[in-house]
Image (cartoon, rainbow, N blue to C red):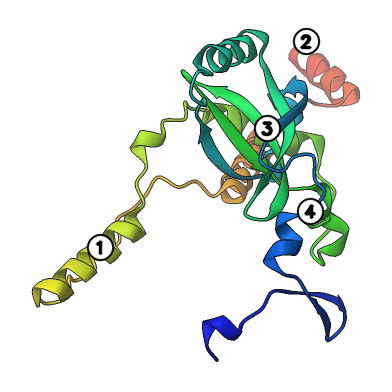
């Protein structure tokens, strides 16, 4: 089939489609066509990261630099992000506009109905009871491993390895051999908790139990004869 023979369509029933032309798409009665409309401002922490789809840098139109900079500084000072809508690639998107350093970034967000509900996943809910002491130790372990996020310390090693293979093939060289796997400081949270619990149990067993009142009285009498 030639590309010219391919048409856009919408499946309104199982196996039944209605054609959608470029003219249909271009003439959609949307207030956001060709513009970015902001409806209000919220705190960034109110947006769960599961809503994030992708991000774009924003830039001002000719002559709009001052308004652009004013919005960027106002959002940064207020600690807020703008919520709005925009049409991209023939689809209306929900977006969040936030300050990033000296720029503005537009985060495209998933609509709620685009996010899979937990109730639709067979693995959930997880019917397991957690003892308060286990939770406390887990929190201590997480706090003990807390660190600053430094993205520059992480690399896409898969991509780097793939590029080396491609470069070798282009040069007609042998394929690079896989390096021996190195040991990483990766912590198995459940294993660490299990060991902590076992150590705590062993310490409780080794700890001498206090004598009952009757035995203590008998011991005192023996020492005083």
Query: Can you identify the residue that label 3 sits on?
Result: 96
Marks 4 & 3, CB-CB < 8 Å contact: no
- Please tell me whether mark 2 sits on a helix, a strand or a loop: loop
Quadrant containing the C terminus is: top right
Query: Can you identify the residue that label 4 sits on?
Result: 28
Residue 39 placement: quadrant? top right
Residue at x 71% of width, y 43% of height: 33
Query: Can you identify the residue that label 1 sits on?
Result: 163
Question: Which one is in front, 148 or 112?
Answer: 112
Q: Is residue 126 visible?
A: no
23 vs 2: above or below = above
- Please tell me whether mark 4 sits on a helix, a strand or a loop: loop
Q: Where is residue 15 shown, x and y percent of the image?
A: 83, 86
170 vs 71: above or below = below
Question: Which one is in front, 12 or 202?
Answer: 12
Residue 80 placement: quadrant? top right
Cα distance in 3D space between marks 2 and 3: 82 Å
């Amino acid at each position: 089939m030639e590309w010219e023979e391919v048409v856009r369509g919408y499946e309104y029933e199982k196996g039944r489609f209605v054609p959608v032309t470029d003219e249909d798409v271009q003439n959609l009665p949307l207030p956001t066509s060709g513009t970015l409309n902001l409806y209000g401002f919220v705190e960034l922490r109110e947006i769960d990261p599961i809503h994030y789809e992708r991000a774009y840098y924003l830039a001002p139109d000719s002559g709009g630099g001052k308004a652009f900079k004013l919005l960027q500084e106002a959002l940064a000072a207020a600690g807020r992000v703008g919520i709005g809508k925009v049409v991209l690639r023939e689809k209306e998107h929900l977006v969040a506009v936030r300050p990033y350093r000296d720029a503005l970034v537009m985060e495209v967000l998933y609509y709620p109905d685009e996010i899979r509900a937990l109730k639709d996943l067979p693995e959930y809910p997880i019917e397991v009871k957690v003892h308060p002491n286990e939770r406390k130790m887990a929190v201590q372990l997480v706090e003990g491993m807390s660190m600053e996020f430094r993205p520059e310390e992480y690399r896409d090693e898969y991509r780097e390895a793939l590029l080396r293979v491609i470069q070798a093939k282009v040069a007609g060289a042998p394929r690079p051999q896989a390096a021996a796997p190195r040991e990483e400081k990766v912590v198995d949270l459940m294993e660490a908790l299990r060991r902590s619990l076992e150590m705590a149990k062993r310490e409780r067993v080794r700890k001498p139990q206090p004598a009952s009142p009757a035995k203590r009285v008998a011991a005192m009498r023996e020492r005083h004869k």
